[in-house]
Amino acid sequence: MSAIEHHTAPTDHATSASVPTTSDAAPRDLRRTWRRIAAVSLVLGPLGVTVIRAVMPYWTSDSTAEMVAGMAASPGRAAAMNWIAVLLTPFLMLSALAMGYVARRRAPVIATWGAAVLFGAYSLGSAVGAPDILVATLLARGDDQASVAADAALLMDAPAMLTGAIAFVVGHLVGMVLVAIAVVRARVVAWWVGALIAVAQPIHVVSAVIVPNRMLDVVLGWGATTLGYAIVALAVLRTSDDEWDLPPRSR
């Protein structure tokens, strides 16, 4: 054999070992991004509901005919209500997960149950919002209010829709109380912040159905919920990346 056939190029083991390959390089650390997404969701979710409760052209305790009349008289407010619901519902669902995540280490059981119940309830929000979209669409087409009210009542009384609406109301009430307890037990926020969140939703139910009062709901119902969530969001932003989650690692 010739010398060329026996020749092999020398290998610089020190150099090759020091240069990481693509598969060995550590992935980008996005823990700060995740914290920011959680904080934004915690604020935008309940804030969206607060604005909806402020602008909706009827009230929860109104009859179907009164609901239709209110939306017919204020189509702009009806449109704002429907668009806010569509755009901000994803943040509401993310806020449920964020509340559970931030309390998962020191209060894992109640945080998990609270987030699961709350997320499940919010996922059924269409059972509450669908009649609003139906009414707005039929009114825009020029249908008379009596027929629109009959169609809306038919939709809301459908067993699947009614079950979803009840599950939404009960679920977000119970879930909110559970996550409020969780963030206090996990020492994410002071006890009074948890109390504010926990009490706000019963006030919402009372002001929506039992003693109808828009201002009470906007200020002490969903408004107070938004304030409590904003304080939790601030705590999330102040949390270190290492406290929030483990760092990424290479494959």
Image (cartoon, rainbow, N blue to C red):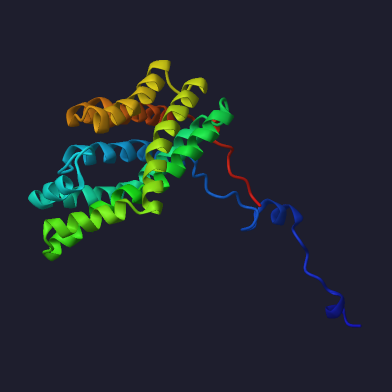
The answer to whether residue 9 of the structure is visible from this angle is yes
Q: Residue furthest bottom?
A: 1
- Which residue is painted at 58% across and 30% down in the image? 109
Camera-nearest residue between 93 and 213: 213
Residue 50 horizontal side relative to residue 188, left or right: left
Q: Residue furthest right?
A: 1
Residue 97 horizontal side relative to residue 140, left or right: right
The part of the image, by quadrant, that contains residue 41 is top left
The part of the image, by quadrant, that contains residue 130 is bottom left
The N terminus lies in quadrant? bottom right
Residue 144 horizontal side relative to residue 88, left or right: left
Q: Residue furthest left?
A: 73
- Which residue is painted at 32% across and 29% down in the image? 225
Compared with 43, 154 (above or below) is below
Residue 68 horizontal side relative to residue 90, left or right: left
The answer to whether residue 223 of the structure is visible from this angle is no
- Which residue is painted at 39% across and 24% down in the image? 198
Q: Position of residue 125 (x, y in %)?
A: 36, 47
Q: Position of residue 245 (x, y in %)?
A: 55, 36
Compared with 117, 199 (above or below) is above
Q: Position of residue 107 (x, y in %)?
A: 56, 26
- Which residue is painted at 54% across and 35% down in the image? 112
Q: Position of residue 199 (x, y in %)?
A: 35, 22
Camera-nearest residue between 224 and 141: 141
